Image (tube, rainbow, N blue to C red):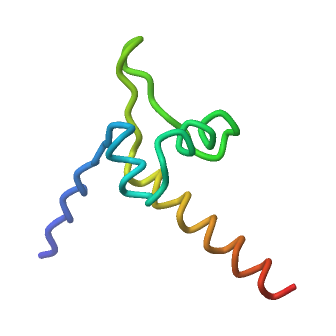
Amino acid sequence: MNRPTPPQPVFNLRPSEASHYLGIGLSTLWYYVKQGKINSIKLSPRVTIFKKEELDNFITTMSENNQTQKAV
């Protein structure tokens, strides 16, 4: 009998943690949010979080873009 795999926990990061995770500055993080490259979740007027999965997708997209530019 196969047991169902439990769902993976969702990790959320605050802006300073997200910028550190991405290896970019905080102002660059907000710049990418403004451009729509990274989605943020506003919990309250003073609290914003980022899903780790969203940040991982951003890293993948950026690395794919860099590979495409190098190939050209």
Q: From the viewer's perspective, is residue 19 above or below residue 47?
A: below
Residue at the outermost right position: 72
Tell me if 47 is positioned left or right of 33 in this view: left
Quarter-wise, where is residue 22 in the image?
A: bottom left
Quarter-wise, where is residue 39 in the image?
A: top right
Identified at 62% across, 39% down, the residue is 31
Residue at the outermost bottom position: 71
Query: Which residue is nearer to you in this view: 32 or 24?
Result: 24
Q: Where residue 12 appears, x then y in whole percent? A: 31, 42
Identified at 42% across, 49% down, the residue is 19
Quarter-wise, where is residue 14 in the image?
A: top left
Say how many tags the image has.
Answer: 0
Is the N terminus in the top left, top right, bottom left or bottom right quadrant?
Answer: bottom left
Identified at 52% across, 60% down, the residue is 57
Tell me if 27 is positioned left or right of 37 in this view: left
Query: Which residue is nearer to you in this view: 8 or 16?
Result: 16
Q: From the viewer's perspective, is residue 53 above or below residue 13?
A: below
Q: Where residue 9 appears, x then y in whole percent? A: 22, 51
Tell me if 11 is positioned left or right of 61 in this view: left
Q: Where residue 20 appears, x then y in whole percent? A: 37, 53
Query: Which residue is nearer to you in this view: 70 or 4?
Result: 70
Residue at the outermost top position: 45
Identified at 80% across, 78% down, the residue is 69
Q: Where residue 72 appears, x then y in whole percent? A: 87, 85
